Amino acid sequence: VTGRATFGDFMRVAARYLGTLADLPPAVGRRRQAAAMTRQVREASDGLLRVISVMARYVADINTAFADVPARDRHLLSAWARASIEAQEALGNAAAFLREGGADQDAPHGTPQTPLAIRLHAVAASLTTGRDLVHTHFAPGSDGVRRDHSDWAPVITSDRVTHALLGELACCARQIAPQGAELALSRAPVQRGTGAARRRLNAACQWLWVLDAAVQAAQREDPVPPDDRQLLYAIPVNARPSRPIPRGGEPVTALCNGVIVAAERVRHAARPLPAQATWSPAMTSTSCRLSAAAAAAVSQNCEILLRSLAARAAQHGSRGTSAQLVESADAAARASASWLRAAHGWDLVTTDTRGYLSQAAADMKDLARWTERFAYTEPAETTSGPSRATRSPADLAPQSGDIPIVVAAVHHACEALTRLADAESGQIEAAGRAGRLLVPTRSLPDTFDIPRPFAQAPPDRIDSLLFTYRDVGTASAGATAKVATVAETVSAHSRILTAAKNAVNASREGSAANARNHRPEPVMTNDRRHHPGPVERVLYDLGVTSPALLQRGSAIDQASQQLITDAAETLSLRQARPIEELSRSPGTAELINHVLASADSRATAQLRPPTHPQAEAEPPQAEP
Amino acid sequence: MSNKEQEADDMNWTTWAQEALNQASGLDEILCAAYDAFEDMLPVIRGHEDQAGGMFAAFVLSAASAADGRDAVATAPSLPPLCPHERAIAAGRPDGEARVEDVARGLASLSELLASRLVDAARSAADPGDQAACTEAARHAANIHALLTGGEP
């Protein structure tokens, strides 16, 4: 709605590239085909290294809290923390295998020409841009430590979103591994001396399966609900949306968008207010008065819209929704009254600077203007007086399907007021401490003999103002909560605001898992594709299309996978042959791949590929 | 008090305030009259905003501008420490039962005159502090007029 790019935009692009199976080179002469295969392996290794590098950076971002936990203490960590550490190790090993073979993520061999490599480079670019987008929500502080730079920052670092992110990375790994391994173990003619490069490519893919298995294990223990994935996808770039300017005569959908964008601008502008209160010239009574007055008007406009929607919902026969809307309207009326009291509080308080208007105040004025155009159908003129025509229920939501759109707009407006109340409260507290709040000398009792037009605000006036703003915060949060309930009921897209709040709260309470009283369906199992095993693959290669035969082949593959896993588990360490020997021949490598692809934690424990001696965590990347 | 009496009182108040502004000669008197006009607008607006209905936003935003205008005038170096009209105007404030549209009309008319007198005062003032204070206060008065007449401030 705000026109800003979201993390999901880039993940969807990556998924599109990942979703297309690798094409084999066109059938040409045997020698040329061998050269093409060699090139494909080399370019795919470069591309895969690029993808793995950016995935490793994502995981390093997540792992900062427990990267130094020794292996012996890992059992004390949560399933997701363990998965994150194992994912980092898997990516380190995969990268080391590829680097050993001369792969270079900077594509030293020129622009990739082969289909899989082209797609891998595109996936890497999407993942990199997605990470850059996420990093716009953080900035280094004066001490060089990363600090939150937006209201989305705590959402991004919340357990629920980081789990969803690991799930996405596992999904990428799961889709890339079979394509890379298929290329590595291809039966097409190859040039001499390429065996080692292909084995290393296959080993890297096996480590991607290990990553997937680690995340799947966490997923089984503490599933990621679909809402968390939606929340991850909804992370927007941290940039103020452009100012929407009402032209007059906008349809309801355009008014909704205008309100949502204006509300987003208020949220964005409100955040830095407390930190800047001690020095900012824009911390003026003009700004605070305007903000409070505009907020009172916005709340009242929201009340009008909610009452109108309640009437419309009742007309559509949705009595439950109608009742919820009436409750929301009452809460908005209480919020309006509390903002009005805050505005009154500024009648006899001023600031040491005047004449400047803060961005938040200017944006609040815009929000008041947009909500007013939404709530009323005629302009405010003295001739119409108090009986100004409001928008009719039928005009507001012609169809019942239009109700969620209007609810979303009101929800965004109420959420913006809640954030503003918190920010203004912090701002007043800081400005009061800094001695920036004044009162007109004429408003003081005659016993004060001050030869200046303004004097320092007495503590009781500051306390009174702060008390009023705390009340404003409570009333605004109450209105937002009521509208959030309606948003949930009518499935308005603004539910994401509640999801974000819940994610942060769950992390703060340290009980993300316990907070969920249900075990939702894992989101990652849906995109698990069927990858044929070695026997089924041979049948395909033979041109077999009979479902019965293919099903038998698949059953044999599953049985062999089970047999290998069970057998490997019974072997003692002394009896077991080094695992790297198992993957030396394409035939056994294919079987091992099939077992690893099952994401069975027993299989990955016994048959995981060898750890590369040079495997190390991705070096930290400088902040952009 | 009957409605007719109340309306008469409203008219008295706005007429009184406008008359004080019109009669003010010299910068100090204009500043005094302007300060009192802004100061007295506040309780009038506050007393009617709850019944303002469709004019609620115009009223609450006007109150913010009235307080800003008063603070701006207060910074003028030529404003005397005590203004002679202060208590007389305060005595004639309308109560909350006057019709909202009449109050809005009276305030709009008063703020228009206020803006005009303050612009003139800014032009004639010798002290830059007075000029700045009058200019800023005139802007807030013009805002009130625009808000209460349906314009964009």
Image (tube, rainbow, N blue to C red):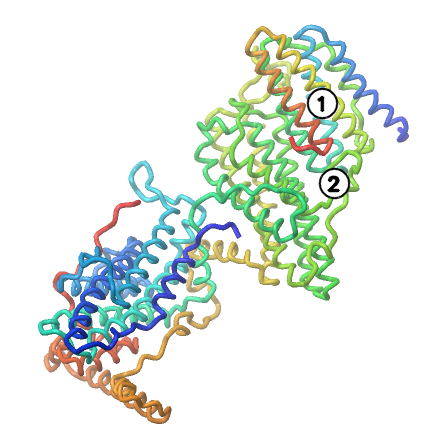
Q: Nearer the viewer, residue A572 or A201?
A: A201
The answer to which image quadrant residue B17 occupies is: top right
- Chain letter of mark 2 equals B
> Which residue occupies 71% across, 19% down?
B37
Identify the amino acid type marked 2: Gly
Q: Nearer the viewer, residue A22 or B15?
A: A22
Asked whether residue A558 is in view, the answer is no
User: Where's the C terminus of chain A, which quadrant?
Assistant: top left
The answer to which image quadrant residue B123 occupies is: top right
- Give the answer, above or below, for where A161 lies relative to A426: below
> Which residue occupies 16% across, 67% down?
A611
- Give the answer, above or below, for where A472 lies relative to A485: above
The answer to which image quadrant residue A101 occupies is: bottom left
10 Å crowding of disc 2: few (<14), some (14-19), many (20+): many
Q: First in sequence, mark 1 or 2: give its number.
A: 2
Q: Mark 1 = which residue?
A: B111
> Which residue occupies 44% across, 57% down?
A506
Q: Secondary structure at mark 2?
A: helix
Residue A57 marker: none
Q: Position of residue A437 (x, y in %)?
A: 53, 25
Q: Position of residue B49 (x, y in %)?
A: 73, 35
> Which residue occupies 48% across, 36% down?
A273
Identify the amino acid type marked 1: Ser
- Total marks shown come to 2
- Chain letter of mark 1 equals B
- Give the answer, above or below, for where B54 lies relative to B94: below
Q: Mark 2 = which residue?
A: B54
Q: CA distance from mark 1 to mark 2?
A: 20 Å
